[in-house]
Amino acid sequence: MYDIVVIGAGVVGGLIARELSKYDLRVCLVEKESDVAMGATKANSAIVHAGFDAKVGSMKARMNVRGSEMMESVARELGVKFDRNESLVVAFENERKEVEEIYERGLANGVKGLSILEHDELMAIEPNLNPELSCALLAKTGAIVCPYELCIAAVGNAMDNGAELLLDFEVCDIEKTDGGYVIRATDGRSVNTRYFVNSAGLYSDKIADMTGDGGFSVHPRRGEYMILDKECGSLVKRTVFHTPTKMGKGILVSPTVDGNLLLGPTAVDMEDKEDNSVTAEGFDMIVKGSLDNVSGIPFGKVITSFCGLRAVGDVGDFIIKYRDGVVTLGGIESPGLTSSPAIAEYVVELFAQNGVKFEKKADFNPYRKPAHEFRESSMEEKNEVIARDARYGRIVCRCEGITEGEIVEAIHTNPPARDVDGVKRRTRGGMGRCQGGFCSPAVVAILARELGTSIDAITKFGKGSVINYSKTKGDN
């Protein structure tokens, strides 16, 4: 019997599991995919929003501002890259009123470090902006982080502190019992728990319906992105938005914590919760929207594109509620990433307010070794590591400089990588210019060796995404 089960191992569920692992509780995190961070967490804008956009008095505003305040220390504890690079909301002269409105809204939400810049001030700090822009809101608390790195680190830290993780656990039924709940998966497995958290993202409405706590719906909103090569990462220093619309914050141009340049997202409401395909129409929208903000973007340097699906609720705000031993989270769209540590904190508060006893562990360890520690070490430090383990001296991914030692470490560190994309998210192996064109066969071989299986059992991202069917040549 678990004390609390968390359904959904995205960044919100991962940080909830980590928050719960601070206490003397038996905690389990269940996820329908074959790895953590496989939903909206793996494909979003990676922005830590300041909090000026959310409606005054809303749950979004409350969680956004608190989460933004918490994120830097959370990232530091978890060894996750974080950059307080600031953000700009730029506008043409006919959009000045919108800038003034979000400035006032930000002040009302309690956001610090806001100011409005005029054209010359704007161009002085970001000379590659579109010179036709008239003004902008500057938010000094805006930042960037890597969402899947944050999720992996949070889940890993929770596991290191005693939480359990069950993957490929697709919930199909929830039964109320005298002692709590039985949560059943499609493959016949089940878990018993006193309480649980519904953090199932796009499927949170489906999970809520299983306990009679529904009454809301969640639909996907497609967001397509382009990633440019690292040589383009300094085109802008700050995250550059345009004035927002009812569909979201619009097309942004932003550096990433790993040095690339990110463009996007589009915003198209969908019905299919699994359709994350990219489109020519979406790319056209990104190109046009990006050039409204920044001049001279070298689109020939795009190295990859992707699509994320945001979990958009039908009430216009985050749904966070407690009922009968269950905390339900619904419609956790943007700024969900920013809000995630605050939501985790609030979930514990809700349980405590409803009689759940929390006793802090004396031995909780909030810290985690950075996944990027080796590649960012000095040459002397690297040589010391290589002297102890020669695998760190063998480069596998030439684009990103990722070694065999780092890949092996990712396979044996909580939560362990089990497929090629899992290695990619943990190490950046395969994220460079060639997008795994050279290193993927070596990664497959390392995975097979370390997991004690054959190369044809290794997948790209689980669930039948087979890479190799059989050998074409003998061992000799």
Image (cartoon, grey):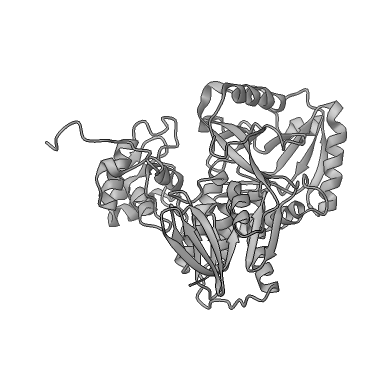
Vertical arrangement, residue 125 with respect to residue 110, above or below: above
Q: Quadrant of residue 139?
A: top right
Residue 234 visible to an observer of this rendering:
no
Q: Position of residue 86 (x, y in %)?
A: 69, 44
Quadrant of the rendered structure where residue 461 is?
Answer: top left
The x and y percentages for residue 375 are: 42, 47
Residue 38 position (above or below residue 158): above
> In the depicted view, which residue is nearer to us: 366 or 467?
467
Residue at 21%, 35% in the rendered image: 471
Where's residue 110, x and y in %? 81, 55
Q: Is residue 328 above or below residue 392?
A: below
Query: What residue is rendered at 88% in x and 34% in y?
Result: 97
Residue name at image x 46 percent, y 56 percent: 185
Q: Position of residue 399 (x, y in %)?
A: 41, 35
In the rendered structure, the answer to whether residue 448 lies left or right of residue 148 reads left
Quick one: 169 or 253, which is closer to the camera? 169
Q: How many marks?
A: 0
| Placement of the C terminus among the 4 image quadrants | top left
> Camera-side residue: 365 or 181?
181
